[in-house]
Image (spheres, grey):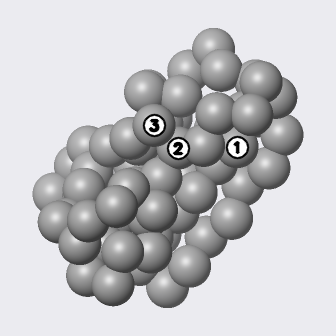
Amino acid sequence: LFTWGQNTHGQLGVGSQTTLIPQPQLVERLKGIPLAQIAAGGAHSVAVSLSGAVYSWGKNDFGQLGLGDTEGKEGHPHP
């Protein structure tokens, strides 16, 4: 999975604090994981693997990452 663009809340999943990533960057934590679906919100992203594992990252102020809390999980995908 490659991402680029606005990264204000770590929604690109590349682990960088840079707010704008103009060139495609590999999401290292998902490298080698076959993905079935990917979705992006305004400040968060979600991916589902072929095995059914769900990964989410980015802004989480309303629990939109589905992790059972509202703590920010910015920068890297979390299962």
* Residue appearing at x 45%, y 37% in the figure: 79
Would you say the residues marked 1 and 2 are in contact, meaning their CB atoms lie under 8 Å apart? yes
Q: Nearer the viewer, residue 61 or 18?
A: 61
Q: Which circle marks residue 79 in the picture?
A: 3
* Residue appearing at x 44%, y 75% in the figure: 64
Which residue is disc 1 drawn over? Answer: 48
Q: Earlier in the sequence, mark 1 or mark 3?
A: 1
Task: Place residue 65 in its image quadrant.
Answer: bottom left
* Residue appearing at x 80%, y 49% in the figure: 37
Estimate how packed mark 1 is, as few (under 14), some (14 to 19) or many (20 or more) residues with alpha carbons within 10 Å: some
Would you say the residues marked 3 and 2 are in contact, meaning their CB atoms lie under 8 Å apart? yes
Q: Which type of secondary structure does the marked residue at label 1 adopt?
A: strand
From mark 1 to mark 3, how far is it between C-alphas? 10 Å
Q: Is residue 47 left or right of residue 35?
A: left
User: Measured along the vertical axis of the image, is residue 8 above or below residue 21?
Assistant: below
Which residue is disc 2 drawn over? Answer: 55
Q: Which type of secondary structure does the marked residue at label 2 adopt?
A: strand
Estimate how packed mark 2 is, as few (under 14), some (14 to 19) or many (20 or more) residues with alpha carbons within 10 Å: many
